[in-house]
Image (cartoon, rainbow, N blue to C red):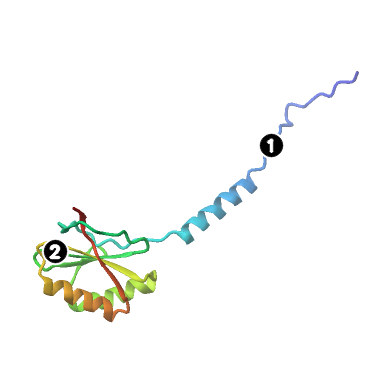
Amino acid sequence: MARKRIREDEEAVIDMTPMLDIVFIMLIFFIVTTSFVKEAGIEVNKPKAANQSKQKSANIFIAVRENGEIWLDKRRVDVERVAANIEKLLAEQPTDVVIIQADKDAKHGIVVKVMDAIKDAGIDRISIAAAKG
């Protein structure tokens, strides 16, 4: 019986290149398929509603505070600039729904102006956020 001697300088080596290739491909896949939500940037005191439904595909949120401030993408926006800002966000990531988070004490006229600006930007589906009541 002849025994094979393994030299000390010879070691079993596992090639890590294919595993690293798969990890990088998965990383690229997740980056490309991720959808980013454009939050309004503030919390509002939403009105309560008994009947409500969830929106699944909304990526743009607009908040209207009780004092009439409009927040979009974590910054304050004038009502005249809402349509331009939405068009910019739509160029980055298209969506067909915009959600308005209006404070329960916000003036109705401001919310209607925001809705008109959203329509001017080309969005037909507008939802109003409400708290469970």
Residue 123 seen in render: yes
Q: Nearer the viewer, residue 4 or 129?
A: 129
Q: Secondary structure at mark 2?
A: loop
Q: Residues within 10 Å of mark 1 (few under 14, many from 20)?
A: few
Residue at position x 27%, y 78% from top?
Answer: 119
Looking at the picture, how far across and down is residue 24, in whole percent?
Answer: 55, 53
Q: Nearer the viewer, residue 107 or 14?
A: 107
Q: Earlier in the sequence, mark 1 or mark 2?
A: 1
Q: Nearer the viewer, residue 7 or 90?
A: 90
Give the amino acid type for the residue marked by disc 2 in the picture: Arg
Q: Is residue 64 above or below residue 81?
A: above
Q: Residues within 10 Å of mark 2 (few under 14, many from 20)?
A: many
Q: Is residue 3 above or below residue 23?
A: above
Residue at position x 26%, y 76% from top?
Answer: 118
Q: Quadrant of residue 43?
A: bottom left
Residue at position x 16%, y 71% from top?
Answer: 111
Q: Give me the disc on residue 65.
A: 2
Query: Going by the image, does 31 lie left or right of 43?
Result: right
Residue at position x 71%, y 33% from top?
Answer: 12
Query: Going by the image, does 34 lie left or right of 87?
Result: right
**Label 1 sits on residue:** 13
The reply to whether discs 1 and 2 touch (Cβ–Cβ < 8 Å) is no
Looking at the picture, how far across and down is residue 98, in whole percent?
Answer: 29, 68
Looking at the picture, how far across and down is residue 112, in whole percent?
Answer: 17, 75
The furthest residue to the front:
51
Between the residue at mark 1 and the residue at mark 2, the CA separation in whole angstroms equals 63 Å
Give the amino acid type for the residue marked by disc 1 in the picture: Val
